[in-house]
Image (cartoon, rainbow, N blue to C red):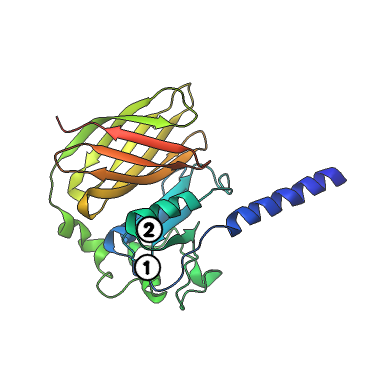
Amino acid sequence: MKKLYCILILSLLLTTTSFAGVKKGKGDVILNKYSLEKFIRYIRGKKSQYPIGFILSSDGSWSTYWFCPERDACGGMNYNPTIKECEDSTGVDCGLFARRYTILWKNGINPGKGKESRIKKKWSDEEIIAKLTELGFLDNNNSSTSTTSKKKTKKYELKGERSIALSWDGYENLIAGTVEFDEADYKGTLKIPLPNNDGTCDGSYSLQKGGKGTWQIACTNNMGAAGTLKWTETGGVTGKGRDHNDKKVKFTVSKKS
């Protein structure tokens, strides 16, 4: 019994230390409309999608997030490689904006803990926007983003599927699947079957200015990954990132036919 107790205490200490080493965001930041839309999707989730982490750049333009297929099953994530990737891509400081439903980013208004910093999944878009505005993460220009963003960004009408080839450290062969595009809204969904009967991965991507964007997937084997991508209107897509165990993930999406 004493040995079991010691192991339990050590496990708790290791988990606490792992999260304590994560770079949390601080300072003034205003989410742009793309980051706001992604944060709302992060809070919403879907069946078997529990929010576990949201990364944001200090200029509010770069963001990505993770879901976990089971509640409390992904507590030991290493966010730092993705934070570094964010900083390399943007040239500004990045950090953990939210963990689960609590906004950790401290800006002089948000305490970063407790009820005052918590977002509820059942809230409407307007309630989430109002809370973010109250905490100083949105200005008046962002307050109507939820209802107008699609009209402002709609430039393309292409929808369909393309093939995707994905390499994932730990898997010997390439993983093949399909990705569904909805470029009218600068976002899409993807579904990838894993080899060796390991299950499937469901995820999404979101595009930003200049053909860049972010992606994330959650898999039925309790794994997941997230990262950045590059896209051109007439070409293909390449992406890279890390999984929950800090293993490299890369993919290529075929060009338009």
- Quadrant showing the C terminus: top left
For the point 32% across and 40% down, the residue is: 239
In this rendering, would 99 be left or right of 94?
right
Q: Which residue is mark 2?
A: 39
Q: Which mark's residue is nearer the viewer, 2 or 1?
A: 2
Q: Earlier in the sequence, mark 2 or mark 1?
A: 2
Q: Is 142 placed above or below 241 here? A: below
Q: Label 2: how many residues lie within 10 Å, few (<14), some (14-19) or many (20+)?
A: many
- Foreground residue, 225 or 80? 80
Above or below for 164 versus 13: above
Q: Are marks 2 and 1 in contact (CB under 8 Å)?
A: no
Q: Position of residue 75 (x, y in %)?
A: 58, 49
Q: Which residue is mark 1?
A: 127
Kind of residue indicated by mark 2: Phe
Q: Is residue 33 visible?
A: yes
Q: In what element is the residue under mark 1? A: helix
Tell me residue 72's x, y (percent): 58, 48
Label 2, label 1: how many angstroms apart (C-alpha)? 13 Å
| Quarter the N terminus occupies | top right
Name which residue lies at 43% across and 73% down.
27
Residue type, numbered disc 1: Glu
Residue found at x 37% / y 58%:
39
